Each structure stands twice: as structure tokens, then as C-alpha cells.
Image (spheres, helix red, strand yellow):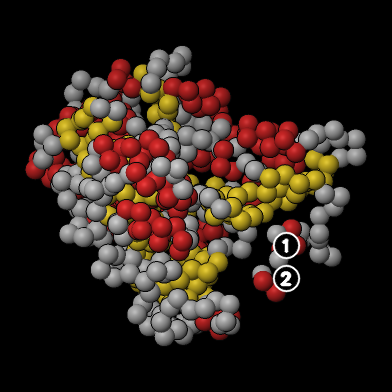
Amino acid sequence: MTNLVTEVVETVDANPESPAIAYEGTELSYAEFWERAGQFAQALENRGIGEGDRVGIYLPNLPQFVTAFYGTLRAGGIIVPMNPQYKAREISHMLGDSEAKAVVALADLVPNVLEVRDDTDVEQVVSVGADVDGATEFDDFLAEDTKAVVDRDDDDVAVQPYTSGTTGTPKGVLLTHHNLAFTTRANAVIPPGGFQASDRLIGTLPLFHIYGMSVVMNGAMYSGGTYHPVPKWDATEVMDQLEDDEITVMFAVPAMFNDMINHPEAERYEFESLRFANSGGSSLPLEVLERFEELWGVQLNEGYGLTETSPVTHANTNENRRKGSIGQPLEGVEAKIVDDDFETVPRVEEGPIDEEEADLRDVTGELVIHGPNVMKEYYGLPEANEEAFTHEDGKRWFHTGDIGYWDEDDFFYVVDREKHMIVTGGYNVYPREVEELLFEHPDVADAAVVGVPDERRGETVKAFVVTTPDAEVTPEEIKQYCLENLAEYKHPREVEFVQELPRTTTGKVQKFELRGEDESEQ
């Protein structure tokens, strides 16, 4: 294999008239989609953007995202996906660090790009949805001619998503053509009979996120199925679409499935075409799984993965599932549980175990991964790369930072997340990023951010704030300040004013106290 998109060529040749993308009542055939991707690739070349250059995609789930994604790869470029909820301050580092030369952005988001453009290498801004001063409208950007697929090596980078580390500083994750091709093929066999050309996959998962991009969009494009992009989550609209468009495959995060089972008219829906449903992004509550299956008679399976692993490493299947587990490693992927000395932790006989009865310290450790889906490295961060990997017996093991155990049937169970990370609705939020913003507020003297339980999202963000002596700010004003400067899912939904923060003698905030936990629970 040379370029990830060469496999799409085979799909196009086999299904030229089949619908590749269906959106708002219109369909784009595989032949039409591939033509537009070629025009996009040629347009990049016409502007001096090509092999090895980065192209930022700053869009919700729209047909133009799919075109720009495959067009960039076709030109030999590298995609830098960006969350459309991000504000200017959040995309500034991503564009500057990646040295992206072009950005495709929703018209409403173009001003954010223009605001930071002088601090980056961005030469070309493409707008989607409307003409905007300082940008070229998407259809006007496309060239008349199409560009052939540029050869790339397996180890060449295809996508550079950004993920926050424990410091909150976004890190560029270098995912190669081989990483993503392997993941797509490995995931394609998980549904019964595998992905098929007759499948209709609903795009509820955002395409800027590796889960929606690699599993759903790529899965559709490589199988010849139809991808149905959903720009914004709305339970009613999606449930209507599942029925009306006869959707066959759905990947989503637990919060989405939770919204569906709690929909006031849930029992009137009948998803007769839906043959496979999968949950990932955060832990799936057992009650959500069982209620979903009770309502619609479709098995709901849980999987696991990370941006750094392209993303999926583990999955349950219809034929082989253990409730409460993240599943077994994908074929070709190795995983194990290790202690602080990188010694393998013994397996339990069969999970899930009673976590209240068992001494978890005896059976748990860190989940580490080895396989062709593991990233090449973090971009330009040698110290982070050294911390992320352990080399043993000729293998390169990636440290997930997640704590769990495994059983003798090779099912894995995650019991805790990385120490301070908050997982809300499937998104990772690192407290330090929010805390640093809070410290910029003139009325904030001290602040700490933690995750607290949330029925819908699993966790949500809570800020504890010590105000300056003469401050007149309210908790609602603090929330609004954060909302104006951070993506919506990152802003604190709860703000509590306190006299002081609990700290150790060395000055570290004791966050377990803020969460109402005992120190022994840490």
C-alpha cells in the first residue's frame, strides 16, 4: 500500500453510481465524490500545497469535510482536524505547531482563523457555507481538473489530530497511512458479516475526532456503504433519521445512547434496519446498554481506543461479548496489564469482578498497547514520546494511562481514567487548560477544576474558585467567561466559590477532597 486513499479507488471502481454521502435529501455518488476530491487535490497543488504539507479542517460533519479529507490525502498532504467548537485561542496552537498552510473552515468560523493567521503559516483559507472576506468559497476553490493520487509510504503521516496531555497542552499525534488503513480493515469485520456496500452508517460522531473519522467515515468509504453526516447531535432528529433513512450501523458515545433511551417518545421508535450499534469514548453504563437492547432489540457493544491508537484497540462483538468489558484486543493488536515496574499483572479468572468485594490493588495495573495501529509519535515532543513508550522484547508498548484488569478469556476491564483527566460525553478535558483560563480572570485569585458525576455525560466539569477580596463576580459570570473562550464541552457547568483550596504542604491542590473522596480512593 502506498497511500491510504488507494483503497478508496477500488471502492469507487466497484460502486461508481452507489451513494457515497447522503445529506439533507441529496446524495453524492462515489464517482461524483471522487471527482470532487480530485478537484480539491488539484486546487491544493495549484496553490503550492502538496506532499507533506498540512491542511487544517475546521468543520462540523458535512460533505465538504469528506471531500477535503480525501482530497488532501490524494494530494499527499496531511490532515489537521480541528474541533468546530474551538475558539481562536484554541486553534492558534494547533495551526502554529503543525505549520498548516491551508484551512477549510465553516463560514462562521473563518474569523477565528483570520484572527490567528498572522501567528501561523496559513496561506489559504477556504470557507464552507458562504462567501467570507479573506477566504475562498469551497466550490470556487475546487479546480476544473483532477489530480492523480500521490504515492506515499506506509510510514508517512496521514493525519495529525491533537490531544491534550496531563499538562493540558495539546500534542500533535502522528498517525500514518498504515495506522489508519489497519484500523479501518480491523474494524470492518466487527459487525456481523462485516461492513457491506448495502450499509448506511450514521455520522453522529464528529469527524474531527478519530473515532468518527477512522471508524465511521473510513469504514463507509472502504466498504462502499453510504455515509450520513450529522452536523449536530439532536436525539429526536437522529432517531427520526434512523427510521427514515433505514440506517444499518451506528457508532456513538454513551451520552448519545443515554439521550435515546430517555427520549420521551422512545417506545414509539422502531429501528428495524439497524443491525449493529457500538459505544465508545467513555465507559458505557450497564443500565444504558440493557435499556437500549430492551427498547429496540439491537445488541449494543462496547469498545475502547485512544487517539494515539487510531483509535480502536478492543471491541466486543455480537458473537463474543462480556458486559462491563471493553472487549478483546482486535486481531493483530496486543494488550496487557502491567504494574509500575512493567511486570505483567496476573489475570482474574473471569470478569467482571465485584469491585467492591475485591482488592483492586492486587489485580489492576496500567493498560499498555502494541500493534500496527499505534501512532508513530507525538509531533516534535521527544520527552513526551519517551514517557509514552516502553520498549521490551523487541516491542514498542504505548502507555494508555488507563487503569484496569484482564481475565483468562482476554477480556479487558477499565476501572479508572488517567489521574486528573475528565471524560465528559466522550470528550477528554484536562483541568489545567480550564484552570489557566480561570487565572486570567481579574476577579479570580485561585482555582481548581475537577470532574464530578453527571447522569448524562458520565462526568462534567466543576470549578472551585477563590475570588479576589473586592470581587463582585457571580458563578454564572464565571461560566459565561469560560464558555466564551473554550469549547462548550470544556466550560464548567458548575462553579462553586470557596474561601480557600485544600493544599498539601508543598502547595499541591488535593483534588480528591474537592471531589468528596477519601485519599485512599486515589
Q: CA distance from mark 2 to mark 1?
A: 10 Å
Identify the residue shown where x is 40% and y is 37%: 236
Q: Which mark is residue 373?
A: none
Residue under label 2: 519
- Quadrant in the picture for residue 307: bottom left
In the displayed structure, does residue 26 sit left or right of residue 374?
left
- Quadrant in the picture for residue 155: bottom left
Q: Amino acid at mark 2?
A: Glu
Q: Which residue occupies the foreground of this view, 379 or 187? A: 187
Q: Amino acid at mark 1?
A: Gly
In the displayed structure, does residue 16 sit left or right of residue 387?
left
Identify the residue shown where x is 56% and y is 32%: 87
Q: Can you say whether 25 is above or below 7 in the image?
A: above
Q: Which residue occupies the foreground of this view, 70 or 108? A: 108
Q: Secondary structure at mark 2?
A: helix
User: Could you tell me residue 237's position as x and y percent?
Assistant: 38, 35
Q: Secondary structure at mark 1?
A: loop
Q: Is residue 38 visible?
A: no
Q: Can you say whether 34 is above or below 153 in the image?
A: above
Identify the residue shown where x is 68% and y is 45%: 494
Q: Is residue 414 visible?
A: yes
Q: Residue furthest right?
A: 469
In the displayed structure, does residue 91 sit left or right of residue 319?
right
Decide: few, some or many residues near mark 1? Use Cα within 10 Å; few <14, some 14-19, many ≥20: few
